[in-house]
Image (spheres, grey):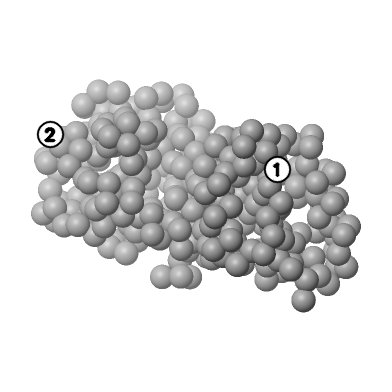
Amino acid sequence: MPAKILVCLDTDPQPSVFDGVVAVDAGVEHLFRHGGITPAAVQDLVYGAIFTRAPADLKNTAIFVGGSDVSAGEKVLAAVTNTCFGPMRVSVMLDSNGSNTTAAAAVIAAGRHVDLSKSTVTVLAGTGSVGKRILRMLADDGARMRLGSRSLEHAQQVADEVRQQAPQAQIECVVTTDEAGLRSSIDGAQVVISSGPPGVALLPQSVRQDYPNLSVAIDLNAVPPLGIEGIEVADKRVEQGATICYGAIGVGGTKMKIHRAAVEKLFTANDLVLDATEIYELGKSLE
């Protein structure tokens, strides 16, 4: 049987060591790692992947799109899928900045404790790359969502983007630049997920303590100060009163499990495109 080859197309100058290690742990036998990738460079790289093996063997070659810039990764993914044609294609996965696998792990964690289809979920800093994917996954599960952001215009733009992919999405945009707006965003919510940038505190303990019936609080920021005050980075199913708390490392085990499983899945067929929805569904199947 042909060896399993993963072609890593990274939009950063240096390909990610993290993604390479996870690929090896997932059973990849050979890594072809390329940095500084732009859409213009994709065609020849994809041709090298699809024209070197017979169609029946192409499931043993796959492409992973990574890098720290999710928007750039999305453009590279589009270029990959547009270059493939007919039977001449290989499976491809997008996980720039860990956005898809991290979002999936967070939503799965929340879903362990509440029925998302009957819940209101607040996503703080929801206009970022992880936040957008959390919203997309929550929409698939029928959750009511509140998108917290510093900019109402930006939040509405992101909400419209999510609705284009999931017309059923129920999203309320809330400006959280002051305490009144922050309280409005979490009042009556069953779940709050903080998906902000590293080192930015979004939900202080002085506010959270006034909502003792919050069922789940998840903080995806691993750099102090953490996004939700009072949650530790390694917290996993830690009970604080009636609230089940997760920190970034607390959901990290699930994220890694999903990442490895997604890489493994790439080699089961030659026509898979693993983006937010596909990776979320895969993650749920692992529960």
**Quadrant in the rendering for residue 219:** top left
Q: Pinpoint residue 244: horizontal percent, then vertical percent.
A: 21, 56
The residue sitting at the bottom extreme is: 1
Q: Which mark is residue 34?
A: 1
Tell me the quadrant of the picture where the C terminus can be found.
bottom left
Identity of the residue drawn at 20% across and 38% down: 229
What is the three-letter code of the residue carrying label 1?
His
- Identify the secondary structure beneath mark 1: strand
Q: Residue at x 34, y 59 (%)?
A: 109
Left or right side of 14 for 131: left
Nearer to me, 180 or 21? 21
Q: Which sits in the foreground, 16 or 262?
A: 16
Residue 11 rendering spot, x and y as whole percentages: 64, 37
Amino acid type assigned to the residue bearing label 2 in the image: Ser
Calculate the distance from the C-alpha at mark 1 to the C-alpha at mark 2: 47 Å
Q: Is residue 21 above or below residue 164?
A: below
Q: Which mark is residue 206?
A: 2
